[in-house]
Amino acid sequence: MSPERQFRFWTVGLVVFIALLWLLSEILLPFVAGMAIAYFFDPVCDRLERLGLSRVMATVGVTGLFVVVLLLVLGLLIPAAISQAVDVSRAVPAVIDLLRERLADLLTTVQAEQPEVLDRVREFVSSRLGDAVTWLTTLAGNLLTGGLAVLSLLSLLFITPVVTFFLLRDWDTMIAKIDGWLPRQHAPTIRRLARETDDILAGYVRGMATVCLVLGTFYAIGLSLIGLNGGLFVGLLAGALSFIPYLGAMGGLLLSVGLAFAQFDNYWLVAGTAAIFMVGQAVEGNFLTPKLVGEKVGLHPVIVIFALLAGGALFGFTGVLIALPVAAVAGVLVRFVLEQYLHSPLYGRVQPAEDDVEDRQA
């Protein structure tokens, strides 16, 4: 088969795959989630196999433990978090009003010292506050609606453990079959690119999952201990969103500080609320991310944000789940194409200057 026909074949295959993904995106969620979980736990099953367990027994143990942990989380944490989420969404308008009153008091206090600056601030606040209130109210409604939408998807979650079990049990067999289907001429190159993609995904997804778990636990415990209403929900939300660079920390910081201003009269408690996120970010930036994720994964924060937003816009929550694998594959392919280009006649060679040649000869 000529290179042109090969290119047309793979292009048509890619188009068909994207079209099927688009058409079936509403029912793919439990299957994509099951595949992601199976990929996540495949090394655990491999290790258990090396310890002497059969693949079936290793899969039963890992899947059973995952289901037990999931049920515990759903039964213990989720109801409390949902209740707090509803309370937080209802409290947002009151928080905005209270913050506006406190801001007005603060502006009145400093009016005598900086009258010109105060006039500019008052003009800005009066022109923008209405838009800010509308945006925050809409955001709170969307969060609540999104939470209820996620709850409606819980009816499908019983499919995910089943999919996870069968994929995890047959993972090595499927990989071997797929390897047998590769075009023989390009099989070594495809295997190398697949290994690079796997290294990126393993380093990023598994590492970031651990980072999100640690940060969510830290934020939830810290905000709850400080007495913040809705602290459990805000902490878990900030931890869950930490896989999007800076969004989890900044969103959690703004939301928790706003709630703290509305709840606490003691500004030390407000400062303590902000300090929790500052400590969390310091630990993440200096310890968690370098140790658990590393810098060799090749996924720049901007690429991660763009991939997640694009996947969510095109395919909803299913798109969010497949965004990082697609970004990892795209990054590996781009680096491969660039490598081929740099070693091709299209790039050429830089000819040394005549003076440099003469200097070397001398």
Image (cartoon, rainbow, N blue to C red):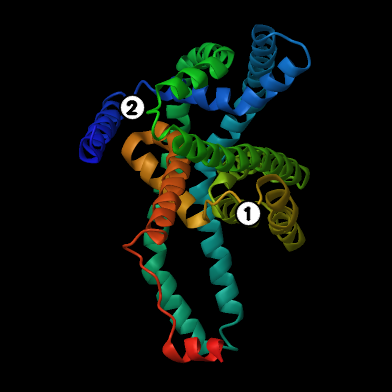
Q: Quadrant of residue 106?
A: bottom right
Q: Is residue 103 left or right of residue 212?
A: left
Residue 25: mark: 2
- Residue 32 appears at what percent x and percent y? 45, 25
SS label for mark 2: loop
63 w.r.t. 24: above or below = above
Query: Does 108 sit left or right of 312 as displayed?
Result: right
Q: In which quarter of the image is residue 42?
A: top right
> Which amino acid type is marked by label 1?
Glu
Q: Mark 1 points at which residue?
A: 295
Quarter containing the N terminus: top left
Label 2 vs 1, first from the N-terminus: 2
Q: Position of residue 31 (x, y in %)?
A: 45, 20
Residue at left offset 69%, top offset 57%: 285
Q: Which of 327 and 268 is in front in this view?
A: 327
Vertical side of 122 occupied by 169: above or below: above
Please give left or right for residue 191 compared with residue 203 in the image: left
Of tags 2 and 1, the one toward the viewer is 1
Q: Which residue is at a point 61% across and 78% down the rendered structure image?
A: 109
